[in-house]
Amino acid sequence: MSGYVQKALRRVQHPPPIKPQNQPHEHTVPNYGATQQYTNTPTKEPTLDTANKIFIQQVLGAFLYYARAIDHTMLVALSAIAAEQATPTNSIVNKIKTFLDYAATQEQAVITYRISDMVLAIHSDASYLSERNA
């Protein structure tokens, strides 16, 4: 999939970022010393028009395919944006721009498979406070 990200960025007409973006989405800053951690409160922003909603869906569709196939580091950011795409606001457009800057900054991802004698054991715990309204 050589050049897929560059083609997708050209298709959505995203200019190259001025500063490199090494984080696919904003993170919630932990409140050290607090007894409880809270998610960000939702804001009352007006929803966007249909053209912006279609733009968000096009970006998510193009990069979700690439993220599932090649670059798994994008999946969390895409999932967070997709969860809010039903009622798009300006904050989602800012998240999309941050994500597109990340995609433009990162090098092309490559998956290499090699044979080995390793036995892989995995443990997964549930995510906590990573999504609003979860």
Image (cartoon, grey):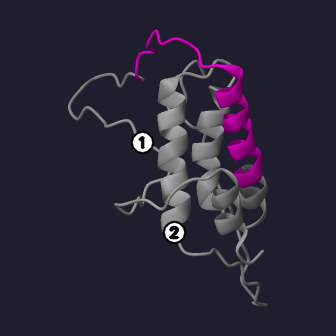
Is residue 41 covered in magenta? yes
- Residue drawn at point x = 53 percent, y = 23 percent: 132
Identify the amino acid type marked 2.
Gln
Q: Indicate which disc, 1 or 2, sits on the residue closer to the N terminus.
A: 1
Picture coordinates of residue 67 (x, y %)?
A: 70, 58
Whole-percent x and y of residue 76? 60, 46
Which residue shows up at 47% across the image and 36% down it? 94
Residue at the image point whose x is 70% and y is 28% from the top: 51
Q: Which residue is mark 2?
A: 106
Q: Few, some or many C-alpha atoms within 10 Å of disc 1 (few <14, some 14-19, many ≥20)?
A: few
- 120 or 22, nearer to the observer: 22
The mark tally for this picture is 2
In this rendering, would 94 be left or right of 56?
Answer: left
**Residue in the foreground of this view, choosing between 80 and 104:** 104
Q: Which residues are magenta?
A: 40-63
Q: Which mark is residue 17?
A: none
- Distance from disc 1 to disc 2, alpha carbons, whole Å, reads 16 Å
User: Where is mark 1, residue-wise?
Assistant: 26
Residue 75 picture location, percent across and down: 65, 50
Tell me the SS state at disc 2.
loop
Could you tell me which quadrant the C terminus lies in?
A: top right
Residue 124 visible at all = no
